Amino acid sequence: MPQFHLYRLVLLVVSVGLTNLPAELFGQKSDPSRLLFLGPNRPVILEMEFVAGRFSIDEMRSQYAKEVFKQLDKDSNGTLSPEEAEQIPTEGRLRVGVERLGEAWTSIDVSPADQQVTLAELTAHIQKALGPPLSIERAPPKLAATVRLYEDLDLNKDGKVSAEEVEQGLKVLQAFDFDDDETLSVAELQPFPISVVQAQQQEQAKEEPVPLFFIRDDAEIELAISGLFDHYSTEEAVSAKILSGLKERDFSRFDLNDDRAWDKDDWELYLKRSRPDFVMKVSLSPPSVEVVKGEYTGRNRPTIDIGGMPVEWRATSKVYQQFDSTRLFLTRFIMSDVDKNKYLDPMEFNGLQADVPFEAVDLDGNQQVTREEIKFFFTMDGLAAQSRLILLLSNETKTLFEILDTNLDRRLNPREFLAGPERLLEYDLNGDQALLPDELMSEFRVTFTQPQLFEIDPARAQTNMMNQRQGRTNEQVSGPVWFSRMDDNLDGEISWREFLGPREMFDTLDTNSDHFIDQSEAEAAEALRTDSGN
């Protein structure tokens, strides 16, 4: 049975009120990082200071590497023999089922190459295998963004949606109303299997370029220049017309040959020499974002203007998952140990609902998972998973579906289509009574956080997505009994199709002549009926 030292370490890392640890380990800060954010009409340079928490990422990874080394060093002689080194996990995470280095272990035996692996060599491997301590990632698009509503409503295929086309929306899309309830949900407008939708979201997140780059060294500047030429759809230079958001003096300062365009040399000079437009401090302990230099709106979640595009900044700490998840699995251990023999066999292990194989947690391979193994595995694996930080970029631009869905029930009803032209006016920038894709102003959100501690169970993820694709219905409809019974789709009003009486009575109850009977009209009619004694 291995010795379980890491659990005590992780409790120290995540506990609140640490008082006996070295002061130099508290509030670990990184050197300020320079970033380039490409806006619609100009680039913006940011200088950001990141505070990960009480321990730095390097400190967490070093401690994790020490524990991995202890588990692999079977003879406890302070080095890993060739046989022991072959068991080093390729991706750094110590699990039974993961790929091991095997004969490739010699690639990390470099300082010196002496047919054994030291703790320093293993630490260097794990640092590289776990990925960069801070990276930029793009979030998958929201479900509403995958709905092909815009293309279907553009009846004349002129590239824009007019007020008349929106008014005809329900009639045009009637074929997609599979449950025949006079409303269109995300699921009905996106008639693909959930697994296909998930794959589309992940693929789109990978393919869509990220307009945010680190520019901390020459290599990153080279990548940023390549990315910005793609972003601004040019190969050699970006014209002053495209960069209209820059002040003339700022543009001319870096336009070395005065040709009214920035080529690669101009960009390189700009990225290296230009002062930051914004200086920010971002912390996960406690989660906070502070704008030190530059204009912004909002206090706890500041929004800054990136070349004509609003970008909201957030900090979200997930370190609590470390302790909470381990405690949850320990509780489930007690409930799953049916025979009370203080360990779980493969059948009992299913009660943990841990989304990991039995063999991964059974570290000594004796077909018995003990309480100590659960503590060790989930604290160690969680430490490895959260030993990096990410800037998660998500596109929060409103979609046509969200613009029309005024009651936020994730479905479109007849009233919302009829009210659509008025809603479009808020986004119709050129006043042509139609909506162009470019008129939907881009809005982004950047979240400074750690990765999710545990991978989501695919079955549970599909259930969550299924719920999100369905519309919300108001089960607590008030008003007269006849009103709630006629409201078949539970949208809080009655259409002529739902009404069970004659047309003349419907028109009488519809006092504002909007072709719907809402709750207030139903209650007024009921009051009159009660007063008249009918």
Image (tube, rainbow, N blue to C red):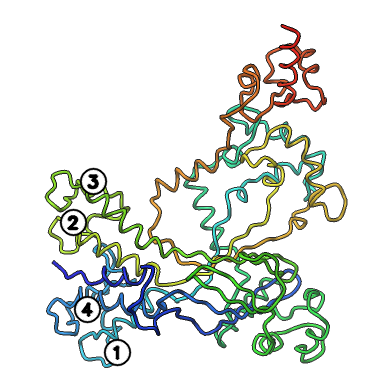
Residue drawn at point x = 52 percent, y = 48 percent: 197
For the view shown, which residue lies furthest in the right direction?
Answer: 431
Q: Which residue is mark 4?
A: 85
The quarter of the displayed image where residue 37 is located: bottom right
Residue 110: mark in rendering: 1
Q: In the rendering, at what x and y percent does residue 384 appear?
A: 35, 70
Which residue corresponds to the image point at 22% horizontal and 58% vertical from the top-left?
359
Asked if residue 216 lies left or right of residue 336, the reply is right
**Which one is earlier in the sequence, the residue at label 1 or at label 3?**
1
* Viewer-side label of 3, 4: 3
Name the kind of residue labelled 4 in the image. Ala
Q: Which mark is residue 381?
A: none
Give the position of the C terminus as an image quadrant.
Answer: top right
Q: Quadrant of the N terminus?
A: bottom left
Q: Which residue in the structure is indicated by mark 3?
A: 335
Between the residue at mark 1 and the residue at mark 3, the CA separation in whole angstroms equals: 48 Å
Q: Earlier in the sequence, mark 1 or mark 4?
A: 4
Q: Residues within 10 Å of mark 4 (few under 14, many from 20)?
A: many
